[in-house]
DNA sequence: CTCTCCCT
């Protein structure tokens, strides 16, 4: 025991908890202790109100396996972390910073005596970076793990990895605390059995909607429901869950509340004061209707509410790997979320929850929310992994693995920001990327900070990065990023309402600035003061460099179009560096939320690395030949074109391949022999391995390999049709394969009459169409490929009409021939219809010709 | 038809 640390009187604390607080979790403490004594992983399943956050860490403080190492408890939110530390410290008769401390960005209270640290999830990643073995930590508790935040998932995977990599004794213990749904997956992942606790909520009655007007707008349904509930619960305050600000505003416009009822909006964009006003209790004799977004589901609790009205909807961001942008979508909530929302009505006494959907629909909701890792921007995660020496996410164990598409997008972005480079041994972190990983901001912003430093604009870059890494209260009024910079630099006095924002943003900026490498001398050229905001933003968001269209609006380097939501002074600028783009899924065009003018002269200096050059070749109908031009572009925006004198064979071939690929090879002449070759090779591939595929879906991706040599002769577009496709296809087969193809799958088959009948390879199995009389005496079904493929024999009448289709000739002679003979003898009397076809002489002629 | 929540 460290000198000077007061021994903790657990006997005093625990009875206090049990008796005074009556927390259900207290009955399970002995079991939790016993389990952690034996096992290194534990899942604790406990609903809200069980008291786990306060009681569990304190109860484990004196366990011998801790060997004086710390307990780290993770919280998804700053306020919750601070509150948890405060409650625990109070129970010990201390204040935060003694035995119990907390740490979060820009705010911490810890000391050398601190044994329990409550930290936000992002801090754990920084801790791991400082000490990858976590040598002074004995237990990590992930609280509210069911929320499945990106940092929580990543922190768990990295903590498990740290334990495996630096195995020591006693080992690091890991505990997940989660709400009641979905713990089975956690148990399986950590190979342990959950300890389950009761909750402490009052019963809440669930009332489902009738779904009588399914097409009614959500705002109208909510309005009706609020009016009904206000009448039906004359003394109650209401909490209404809506997806977003728009619905809150429209509902408030429609409502005409009775006297004594106050309407209070509540969402994250409101200032702290406005949020507190929404939560504050009413004056005596009055009641309130709080119209809230998801902020009231987890972050803020509203006391004095015993009726909840749940629209069943929420807005969620969805990262689109195609455009590297997140956009908002309105989606149905999960069952877990509906339980959480309902619980808000039962905190102090029994309550009622109105759900605006039917009981049958409840069953169809997803059981739980999708883990954030499945729909998030993964560029930060990818950079962190590389900084930890994890070059492939597959090296870690994941509860939910990062999706491949978004991960690849993240890698592409990091390559574009020069954080990664390709080497013969695969992708590696560059020194620049290493410096980026040290900075606690999105990789785009970290890159911008380093560039700002290199052009002698460290402070401006830090101000911009700070603005862009947090909620931006100015975005409603102004899209021009320069407005923020003027406030933060002190050039323009900041309005009083923005003082809190200004203070926090400057704090953030200072921290970011301190994370940059020590004073490097500006070495990358000197932009002018006017050029700076645009340059910095364009370095962070090169894919959102935008150029005005003649028709108005802008086109982005990523190919999409966007515009300002309302007339804006910025649209005098032909070029913009756009930072944030908004827009709701399903609506056409995106909205520019923040941007700065961009000086195109920078493309010749500091932004030169963003340019790409390409030779574009195309067929020119007028001159009847291929023309080439050299094109300089920023992403999808073309800057300059220069006509070239001649077209190289290589460039022309490449263009022809593109055209062929776009046409899915329909621009080539697929003759009957080509088709037959393809059919035959398909047959052989079914019988044997090692045959190439001539299917379109396999040929199109490999056009460069097999078609390119034949394209050298194609000087005009019309030459494509003359190209010898058959030879090109055949060359995909080895000589031996070509020989065997002819031997195994012959063009013709010799039937008993001596005719050499063409086999029809268009069907599988192939068809042998032959006059019935020519097959007399044939006891076995004809076959090819050394007897491995029985042909489908189409037995034809003398007029060439199919009489019978069979793959079993003996059975035909035995069973069906007699009936065919009876019917046909009258119609074709000149042809032979013998009683015993197997001993008759096969012939292709009539009786008369046969005799002659 | 003016963007959910959260964090280094």
Image (cartoon, rainbow, N blue to C red):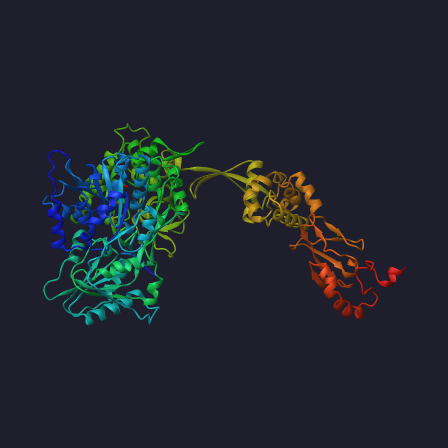
- Of A79 and A91, nearer the camera is A91
Count of residue discs: 0
Give the position of the N terminus of chain A as an image quadrant: top left
> Is residue A351 rendered to the left or right of residue A328?
left
What residue appears at the point 77 percent right and 70 percent down from the top-left corner?
A822
| Residue toward you, A376 or A20 | A20
Residue toward you, A491 or A13: A13
Left or right: where A795 falls relative to A629: right
Residue A727, percent across and down?
66, 42
Q: Is residue A830 left or right of residue A704?
A: right
Asked where in the image residue A690 lies, by quadrant, the reply is top right
The percent position of residue A554, horizontal first and vertical second, equals: 38, 48
Residue A129 at x, y = what percent? 28, 35
Q: Is residue A669 visible?
A: no
Quarter occupied by residue A236: bottom left
In this rendering, is residue A403 above or below A168? below
Q: Which quarter of the figure is the C terminus of chain A placed in?
A: bottom right
* One can see residue A39 in this view: yes
- Left or right: A53, with A418 as reference point: left
Residue A570 in the image: x percent, y percent?
A: 31, 47
User: Hey, which residue is sitting farthest right in the picture?
Assistant: A852
């Amino acid at each position: 025991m460290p000198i000077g640390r007061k021994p903790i009187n657990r006997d005093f604390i625990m009875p206090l908890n049990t008796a005074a607080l009556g927390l259900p979790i207290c009955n399970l403490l002995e079991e939790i202790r016993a389990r952690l004594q034996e096992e290194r992983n534990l899942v604790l399943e406990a609903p809200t109100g069980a008291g786990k956050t306060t009681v569990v860490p304190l109860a484990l403080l004196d366990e011998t396996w801790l060997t004086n190492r710390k307990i780290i408890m993770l919280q998804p939110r700053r306020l919750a972390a601070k509150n948890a530390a405060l409650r625990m410290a109070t129970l010990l008769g201390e204040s935060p910073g003694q035995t119990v401390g907390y740490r979060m960005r820009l705010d911490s209270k810890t000391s050398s005596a601190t044994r329990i640290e409550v930290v936000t999830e992002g801090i754990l990643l920084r801790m791991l970076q400082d000490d990858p073995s976590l040598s002074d930590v004995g237990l990590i508790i992930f609280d509210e793990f069911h929320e499945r935040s990106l940092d929580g998932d990543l922190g768990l995977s990295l903590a498990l990895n740290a334990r495996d990599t630096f195995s020591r004794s006693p080992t690091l213990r890991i505990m997940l605390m989660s709400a009641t749904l979905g713990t089975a997956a956690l148990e399986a992942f950590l190979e342990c059995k959950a300890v389950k606790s009761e909750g402490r909520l009052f019963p809440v009655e669930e009332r489902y909607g009738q779904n009588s007007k399914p097409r009614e707008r959500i705002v109208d349904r909510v309005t009706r429901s609020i009016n009904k509930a206000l009448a039906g619960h004359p003394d109650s305050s209401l909490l209404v869950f809506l997806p977003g600000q728009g619905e809150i505003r429209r509902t408030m416009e429609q409502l005409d509340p009775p006297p004594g009822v106050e309407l209070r909006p509540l969402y994250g964009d409101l200032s702290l004061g406005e949020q507190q006003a929404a939560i504050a209790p009413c004056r005596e004799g009055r009641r309130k209707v709080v119209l809230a977004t998801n902020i009231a589901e987890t972050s803020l609790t509203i006391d004095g509410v015993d009726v909840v009205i749940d629209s069943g909807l929420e807005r969620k961001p969805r990262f689109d790997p195609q455009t590297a942008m997140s956009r908002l979508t309105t989606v149905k909530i999960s069952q877990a979320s509906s339980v959480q929302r309902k619980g808000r009505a039962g905190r102090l006494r029994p309550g009622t929850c109105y759900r605006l959907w039917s009981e049958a629909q409840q069953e169809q909701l997803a059981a739980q929310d999708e883990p954030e890792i499945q729909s998030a921007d993964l560029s930060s995660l990818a950079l962190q992994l590389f900084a930890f020496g994890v070059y492939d996410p597959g090296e870690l164990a994941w509860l939910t693995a990062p999706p491949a598409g978004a991960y690849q997008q993240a890698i592409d972005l990091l390559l574009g920001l020069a954080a990664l480079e390709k080497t013969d041994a695969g992708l590696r972190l560059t020194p620049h990327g290493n410096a980026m990983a040290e900075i606690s901001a999105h990789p785009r912003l970290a890159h911008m900070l380093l560039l700002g430093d290199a052009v002698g604009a460290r402070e401006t870059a830090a101000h911009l990065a700070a603005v862009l890494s947090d909620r931006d209260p100015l975005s409603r009024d102004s899209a021009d990023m320069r407005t923020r910079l003027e406030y933060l630099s002190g050039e323009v006095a900041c309005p009083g309402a923005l003082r809190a924002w200004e203070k926090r943003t400057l704090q953030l900026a200072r921290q970011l600035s301190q994370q940059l490498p020590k004073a490097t001398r500006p070495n990358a050229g000197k932009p002018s003061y006017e050029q700076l905001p645009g340059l910095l933003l364009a370095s962070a968001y090169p894919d959102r460099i935008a150029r005005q269209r003649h028709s108005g609006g802008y086109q982005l380097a990523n190919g999409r179009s966007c515009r300002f939501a309302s007339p804006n002074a910025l649209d005098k600028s032909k070029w913009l560096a756009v930072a944030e783009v908004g827009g709701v899924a399903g609506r056409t065009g995106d909205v520019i939320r923040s941007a700065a003018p961009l000086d195109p002269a920078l493309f010749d200096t500091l932004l030169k690395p963003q340019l790409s050059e390409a030779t574009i070749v195309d067929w020119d109908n007028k001159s009847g030949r291929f023309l080439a031009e050299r094109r300089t572009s920023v992403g999808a925006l073309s800057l300059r074109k220069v006509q070239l004198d001649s077209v190289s064979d290589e460039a022309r071939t490449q263009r022809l391949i593109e055209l062929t690929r776009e046409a899915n090879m329909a621009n080539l002449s697929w003759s009957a022999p080509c088709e037959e070759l393809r059919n035959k090779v398909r047959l052989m591939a079914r019988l044997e391995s090692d045959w190439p595929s001539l299917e379109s879906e396999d040929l199109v991706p490999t056009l460069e390999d097999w078609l390119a040599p034949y394209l050298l002769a194609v000087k005009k577009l019309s030459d494509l049709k003359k190209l010898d496709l058959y030879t090109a296809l055949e060359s995909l087969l080895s000589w031996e394969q070509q020989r065997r193809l002819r031997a195994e799958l012959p063009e013709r088959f010799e039937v008993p009459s001596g005719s050499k009948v063409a086999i029809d390879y268009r069907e599988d199995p192939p068809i042998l169409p032959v006059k019935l009389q020519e097959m007399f005496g044939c006891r076995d079904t004809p076959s090819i490929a050394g007897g491995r493929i029985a042909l489908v024999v189409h037995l034809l009448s003398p007029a060439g009409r199919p009489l019978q289709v069979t793959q079993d000739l003996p059975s035909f002679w035995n069973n069906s021939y007699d009936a065919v003979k009876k019917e046909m003898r009258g119609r074709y009397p000149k042809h032979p219809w013998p009683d015993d076809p197997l001993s008759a002489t096969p012939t292709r002629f009539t009786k008369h010709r046969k005799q002659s």
